[in-house]
Image: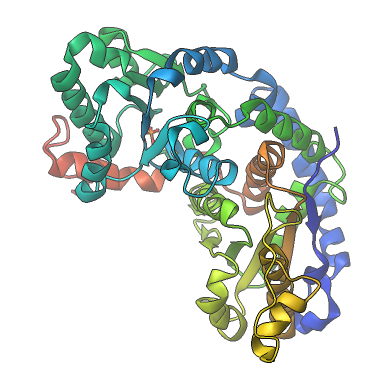
Amino acid sequence: MTIQLRLDTTYIHDSRLGAHALPEDQIAGLHGRLREVLDEIANERRAGQHRFRELPHLRIQVDEIKQIVAEYKDQTDNLVVLGIGGSALGNIALQSALNPYGYNLLPADQRKGPRLFVLDNVDPVAFEAVMAFCSEDWSRTLINVISKSGETAETSAQFLIVRDRLIQALGEEEARRRIIVTTDPAHGTMRGIVDREKYRSLVVPDGVGGRFSVLTPVGLFSAAMCGIDIDGLLDGAAAMDQAVSDPNPATNPAARIAAIHHLYMERGKRLHVMMPYSQQLKDMADWYCQLWAESLGKIRPSDGQNVGPTPIKALGATDQHSQVQLYREGPNDKVITFLEVEEFDVDTVIPRGFKDIEAMDYLGRSRDGTLGGLLNTEKKATELALLASGRPSLTIRFPSVNARTVGEFIYLYESVIPIMGKLQGINPYDQPAVELGKQLTFHFMGRQGYEKSPMG
Ligand code: PA5
């Protein structure tokens, strides 16, 4: 299986970057270490680690997801996902990448499924706005509660409220039918509740952390409900698995991305901007930010150093008018990753108007005179403008945005993480620093067992 995404690293080593160019021989100098890293990962994978790597092949509960979708789709106008962090960001990213912009606003017969609301915050104003849609007809609302731990305060609070409203509107029995819980297969508070209340459930597979779980029932169920081709996503991920299993770092795209970022971090470029020139991929940059931040921002056990890049999301062309001033003239501490789309699903010709006013007329006259053409021209312009200021960038090129290429992209970036983890000497799969905030919340909210402040 060949991959469709293309990685373009021209503006990493271009001589116009001057002292900021990363010469190919420096990347090649890391190849010895990268070979060891790729070998370690392959061995660890055979021993059952890096579980997310198996997901495209295991296709966990895909048949069950399709069965639930077949059962519920015609009875559902609103699908509400309750989750946060890794239990929400992938769902949001898939929806905006693979369903039309403004999907929820389309009439039902033009949508491929129910409206989707992903409630990944406990802001009461946003929450009640969604509840107002649901209360139009609770019997046509389906709730998907997603929590691996089953302990997350935000998700638990939302679940309590929604369950209460469902029971008030529909009674216990029907309310139960309108809740699907995605949680750990065997452990945790939510699994206990599923067993006791007999909720229908899906699993967050063992050994797969939240931010690596979009290709599990966590991300796949809401996607399938909304008509997204989940087989295509998994096919794309499977194709990328072959590419990122390549033991040769020179031809392995995950190893190359990791090497570039690692070497630039050693040269002080610790800010990593992901800038899609595609509205569809905007939320993929959000997903990437969590993956990068929670996985790589760590205390390195060997020397106690605080390490890790700071991921930043930007959107082209919008943020050219907001961020690019900083990216060109501010500190030269960033590496920009562009996401570029060659063929947009639709493109719009810019008409010629005001032929006597050149500042207007060139747009429609240009051979790139479509909105997609303009967007991609702006990407090229930004890339070259950054180059002129000695700012390195790389590009991931999508021939088009579809389930297959999105599956490739997700799997590619997830696969970069353990390589970066090993290069930096940290465990990318834990998130110990998130715990204190969670425990303090339990303490202040009066949870039993947390009477003593964890701050001492
Ligand atoms: O990536 C992670 O592990 C986190 O972002 C979790 O997904 C997030 O904290 C939600 O956790 P849970 O699914 O246990 O409710």
Picture quadrant of residue 334: bottom right
Q: Position of residue 24 (x, y in %)?
A: 87, 66
For the N terminus, give its image quadrant. top right
Q: Is residue 265 visible?
A: no
> What count of labels does the image hold?
0
For the residue pair 403 and 188, the one nearer the viewer reads as 403
> Does residue 113 appear left or right of residue 260 in this picture?
left
Q: Position of residue 455 (x, y in %)?
A: 21, 50
For the residue pair 248 and 344, the one nearer the viewer reads as 344
For the residue pair 267 and 9, the one nearer the viewer reads as 9
Colour mode? rainbow
> Does residue 49 appear left or right of residue 2 in this picture?
left
Q: Is residue 256 above or below residue 335?
A: above
Q: Position of residue 27 (x, y in %)?
A: 82, 61
Residue drawn where x is 87% and y is 59% of the image? 28
- Image quarter for ligand 1 equals top left
> Does residue 218 appear left or right of residue 262 in this picture?
left
Q: Is residue 195 above or below residue 164?
A: above
